[in-house]
Image (cartoon, rainbow, N blue to C red):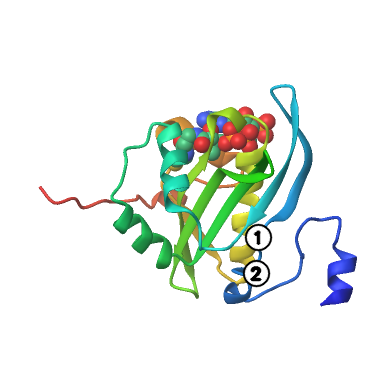
Amino acid sequence: MAFWKFFFKNTGIFDMPRSIESVKSIKNILLIKNLENKGQVTDIYVSLDNNIDLYDLEKLCESVGWVRRPIKKVKTAIDNSFLIVSLFCEQNKKKRLIGFARVTSDSAFNATIWDVVIHPEFQGKGLGKALMNQTIKHLRYADISTITLFADPNVVSFYRSLGFITDPDGVKGMFWYPL
Ligand SMILES: CC(C)(COP(=O)(O)OP(=O)(O)OC[C@H]1O[C@@H](n2cnc3c(N)ncnc32)[C@H](O)[C@@H]1OP(=O)(O)O)[C@@H](O)C(=O)NCCC(=O)NCCS
């Protein structure tokens, strides 16, 4: 591993196939150095550790206007997710959660991406794209070939720019809700 660490030290993450279990040990890897944000320069880190602070996550979700969810259910959702991708910046020597996505999967064929969010203070700087690219990269390493998501109408073009297509071969997403 030392060789690969050396070889990929400038990429911020080891670009080699890894099992999904082993990626969960990837914590605080430098993803973007010196990102300029509101006159300040900050480094952005990526973590695939599913042991995240649930209150920080709910604060992040609230920052984009999502309704608060019962924390116990959020914990169950995180614990049962296939992959968690978090982005952090460093503020006052502390890591602050500024981006998040999670994935559910059958571990073989299909994966669905949920809860994609970048804090409003950090939007429009390429972090949403970086977050999605990290997510897709690790799903491809796990040999997952069908990746789906549910896009809010105002973000369809964001996902299109990442290669997602709507209604492939006329296939429609369908939902069932309790009445
Ligand atoms: C959607 C979201 C994750 C995008 O993150 P971001 O960091 O602002 O996006 P980026 O800066 O990486 O943008 C990447 C590209 O998508 C475009 N884009 C970003 N947000 C967009 C939006 N809401 N609609 C359409 N295009 C968008 C950008 O213009 C950029 O295009 P470019 O590569 O041609 O320059 C972020 O706006 C967000 O958290 N929104 C609130 C939560 C939400 O709606 N999540 C999705 C739920 S389905």
Outermost left residue: 179
Which residue position holds label 2? 141
Left/right of residue 42 with respect to residue 142 in the rendered view: right
Q: Is mark 2 within 8 Å of ligand 1?
A: no
Question: Badge 1: few (under 14), some or many (20 or more) residues near its Cα, within 10 Å?
Answer: some
Q: Contact, CB < 8 Å: mark 1 with mark 2?
A: yes
Name the residue located 65 percent from the left edge and 69 percent from the top edge: 141
* Mark 1 residue type: Lys
Outermost top residue: 39
* Mark 2 residue type: Tyr
Name the residue located 89 percent from the left edge and 66 percent from the top edge: 7
The quarter of the picture where the N terminus appears is bottom right
Name the residue located 51 percent from the left edge and 46 percent from the top edge: 165
Left/right of residue 45 with respect to residue 9 in the rendered view: left
Looking at the image, can residue 136 be seen?
Answer: yes
State ligand 1's quadrant: top right
Looking at the image, can residue 123 be seen?
Answer: no
Measured from the top left, where is residue 39 in percent x and y? 74, 22
Which labelled disc corresponds to residue 137?
Answer: 1
Measured from the top left, where is residue 13 in percent x and y? 75, 60
Cα distance between the residues tagged 1 and 2 = 6 Å
Q: Which of 41 and 162 is in front in this view?
A: 41
Secondary structure found at label 2: helix
Name the residue located 59 percent from the left edge and 61 percent from the top edge: 48
